[in-house]
């Protein structure tokens, strides 16, 4: 067994409490990030599903001519953000209203004149459904003189996108705080280990051991702690996902790439924390 691996495993046995604290600190730092990642991912999926239904409805005046209808429809369809433009006639609008509002069917049937306007229903292309892009197209359509009103649910669209940004920001802040705690715990564990083995390290240096040779067990110890912490964080996140899905509401699991990145982040975090700590404290031995 290589020297570095043997010494790292020995350090785990000598200081199990510090090792466990390091692993748990990394795990909970990444677990918090994972929870917010799960939340942000599901918010994004909800936004994507809502975005699929995002459309602009432009209500048209009765004075609109056939030539204006044909020309404007072609111009709107030519916009780069627009996927499709559907013209809804007054009769189609009335038929839809009667089908969707059965309780008012008799009222609609007794009408002498159709009060509902014709409209354009404009659906947007994927990637062009942000509030800014939708509003830009809506203003372009509103500029036509025969367009009486344009609606696209601006308020709720802005609210959903704002929630996604807030979730991402909170995840970074809280996850960063836990990451700092994890770094402090790992650095403390490495410092104690270096101090406990100061005589051994001094002898190794006297016989010509390089800094890399001396540091390698500590770096491997940090890497292993980070790996275990990342795996534990993934398990905790999976458990939370299962609990939420079975007791509260249906959620989607994170992409596999995110889980791999979580484990790699834990591994890298443990390695970097150990590297910083051991370089700082070996000079004092």
Image: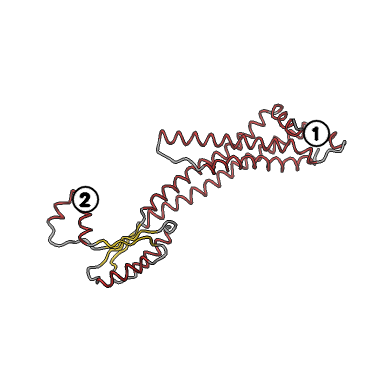
Return the x and y of residue 122 as percentages of the image width and height. 34, 61
Q: How packed is label 1: few (under 14 Cα within 10 Å), some, or many (20 or more)?
A: some
Please state which of the two labelled residues, at mark 2 or mark 1, is closer to the viewer: 2
Q: How is the image coloured?
A: secondary structure
Residue denoted by label 1 = 198
**Left or right: 259 with respect to 127?**
right
Residue denoted by label 2 = 101
| Residue depicted at x 29% and y 68% | 147
Q: How packed is label 2: few (under 14 Cα within 10 Å), some, or many (20 or more)?
A: few
**Left or right: 136 with respect to 271?**
left
Q: Secondary structure at mark 1?
A: helix
Return the x and y of residue 98 as percentages of the image width and height. 19, 53
| Residue depicted at x 36% and y 64% | 138
| Residue depicted at x 56% and y 43% | 175
**Left or right: 211 with respect to 225?**
right
**Left or right: 8 with respect to 136?**
right
* Along the viewing direction, whichever of 253 and 168 lies nearer the viewer: 253
| CA distance for labels 2 and 1 | 82 Å
| Residue depicted at x 55% and y 47% | 172
Residue 239, numbered label: none
Q: Secondary structure at mark 2?
A: loop
């Amino acid at each position: 067994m290589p020297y570095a691996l043997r010494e790292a495993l020995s350090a785990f046995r000598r200081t199990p409490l510090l090792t466990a604290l390091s692993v748990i600190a990394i795990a909970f730092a990444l677990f918090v990030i994972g929870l917010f990642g799960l939340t942000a991912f599901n918010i994004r999926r909800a936004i994507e599903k809502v975005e699929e239904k995002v459309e602009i409805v432009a209500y048209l005046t009765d004075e609109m001519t056939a030539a204006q209808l044909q020309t404007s429809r072609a111009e709107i369809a030519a916009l780069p953000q627009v996927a499709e433009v559907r013209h809804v006639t007054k009769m189609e609008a009335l038929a839809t209203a009667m089908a969707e509002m059965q309780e008012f069917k008799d009222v609609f049937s007794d009408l002498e004149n159709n009060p509902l306007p014709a409209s354009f229903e404009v659906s947007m292309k994927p990637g062009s459904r942000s509030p800014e892009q939708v509003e830009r197209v809506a203003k372009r359509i509103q500029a036509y003189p025969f367009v009486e009103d344009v609606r696209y649910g601006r308020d709720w669209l802005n609210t959903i996108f704002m929630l996604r940004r807030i979730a991402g920001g909170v995840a970074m802040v809280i996850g960063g705080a836990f990451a700092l705690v994890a770094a402090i715990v790992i650095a403390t564990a490495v410092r104690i280990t270096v101090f406990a083995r100061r005589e051994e390290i001094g002898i190794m240096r006297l016989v010509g051991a390089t800094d890399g040779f001396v540091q390698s067990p500590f770096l491997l110890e940090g890497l292993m702690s980070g790996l275990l912490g990342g795996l534990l964080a993934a398990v905790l996140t999976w458990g939370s996902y299962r609990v939420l899905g079975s007791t509260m509401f249906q959620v989607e699991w994170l992409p596999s790439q995110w889980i791999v990145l979580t484990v790699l982040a834990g591994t890298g975090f443990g390695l970097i924390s150990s590297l910083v700590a051991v370089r700082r404290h070996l000079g004092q031995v």
